[in-house]
Image (spheres, rainbow, N blue to C red):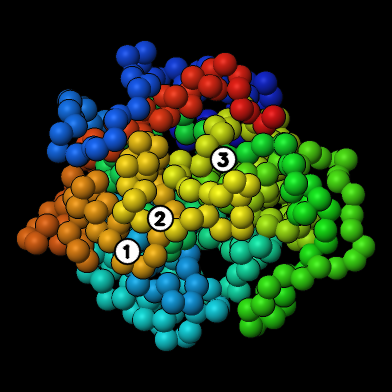
Amino acid sequence: MIRSRNGVVEHGEEMVYRINSLFSIFPAHISMNQRKPGYAESKINQGALPPPSGPTVPRFAYLVSGSKGDLEKLWRTLHALYHPRNQYVVHLDLEAPADERLALASRIKNHTIFSKVGNVYMITKANMVTYRGPTMVANTLHACAILLKRSKDWDWFINLSASDYPLVTQDDLLYAFSSLNRNLNFIEHTSQLGWKADKRAMPLIIDPGLYMSTKSDVFLATPRRTLPTAFKLFTGSAWTVLSHSFVEFCVWGWDNLPRTLLMYYTNFVSSPEGYFQTVICNVPEFTNTVVNHDLHYISWDTPPKQHPHTLTLNDTDKMIRSNAAFARKFKQDDPVLDKIDKDLLGRASRSFTPGAWCSGKPKCSEVGDFNKIKPGPGAQRLRQLIAALAMKANLGQDQCK
């Protein structure tokens, strides 16, 4: 079953949302044209974007995670992402020195806004996380469980790392998602495994992060295994935007598939790039809620390597033209982050990204009305991307194929 956000529980065929209706909220006049390079945010016609009011404005629940040396990156990303409407879980894994984790906990506890609003939670009992192993999936599910326990009043879960950064303000993101069906899931996926079938699905790996307190890479075990026949494998991006209802399904697992697949992916190379894809595409109640995109700008080699290119100022125009909500990965304090802050987010150094909620002097030093939002050019860009995705979905393309 899928629980709708108005509290109504729907059963059987009625709960299977056709993609036509999921995206019918988009007006036909939304332009699909990409803007030309050489952008300047000040030159964009911001138009009159009437902000939605009250219950139509959604809430997001974030996991922002990092490792050794990521304290300052995570702190900056958290400030760029912050909005009082949302919920945040932050995590520095067990590889990070104890003093870094203690420093993060102290900053959150003593931060005026964070302590007043109470929507930033740190996982103080750190998990060991290996990117290519199942411990990253376990850490994500841990954060999901915490968010479900702390608050039921959120609509989408977004997992990010300290190397991610937003390309739109939270007011932009909230506005762009306001008219969306709350059961949509943004998960890049494909069943065309290609080289991954031989290199990732068939080898058996062991992740020492499951039983060791020090970090080491996964290692191969023997023998190899065949591809599964009880379910169909899918692969894609480790970065997702998941609906509240799908997160509940993954954590509670009332038909046992999420637990079965979690055990299967325990021995799978790079399980974060397949677990959620395989779960959602093997459950008929959810397959029609999938949008094949992770809302990220990521620059990969061809064929992709384990890690993407590190983004710099040279990638700025491509990031903007992608219309994505987020980008990765970035080095700490790279000049491109300052440019994003200045040109896209309107964010001052060491401050929050401004939004309609900001009050006080200096700006954003106090919390005003966080039910109000003030969308800008980023909202138009993101709605343009989502409208293009809607067109594909309306044609029945790119859904669990």
What amino acid type should be assigned to the residue bearing mark 2? Leu
Quarter occupied by the C terminus = top right
Whether tag 2 and tag 3 are in contact, CB under 8 A, the answer is no
Whether tag 1 and tag 2 are in contact, CB under 8 A, the answer is yes
**In the image as oriented, which residue stretches furthest toward the bottom?**
99
Q: Nearer the viewer, residue 277 or 323?
A: 323
Q: Nearer the viewer, residue 153 or 136?
A: 136
Pointer 1 residue: 334
The span from disc 2 to disc 3 (Cα, nearest Å) is 22 Å
What residue is shown at x 72% (from left), y 70% (from top)?
218
Pointer 3 residue: 187
What amino acid type should be assigned to the residue bearing mark 1? Asp
What amino acid type should be assigned to the residue bearing mark 3? Ile
Pointer 2 residue: 311
What residue is shown at x 54% (from left), y 17% (from top)?
394
What residue is shown at x 75% (from left), y 46% (from top)?
195
Is residue 258 at all visible to an observer of this figure?
yes
**In the image as oriented, which residue stretches furthest toward the left?**
361
Q: Secondary structure at mark 2?
A: loop
What residue is shown at x 27% (from left), y 52% (from top)?
340
* Left or right for 195, reference 165: right
* Left or right for 351, reference 306: left
Image coordinates for residue 290, horizontal then vertical, percent: 58, 32
Quarter occupied by the N terminus = top right
Image coordinates for residue 246, horizontal then vertical, percent: 59, 42
Which is more N-terminal, label 3 or label 2? 3
Classed neighbour count for the residue bearing mark 1: other residues with Cα under 10 Å, few (<14), some (14–19), many (≥20):
few
Q: Secondary structure at mark 3?
A: loop
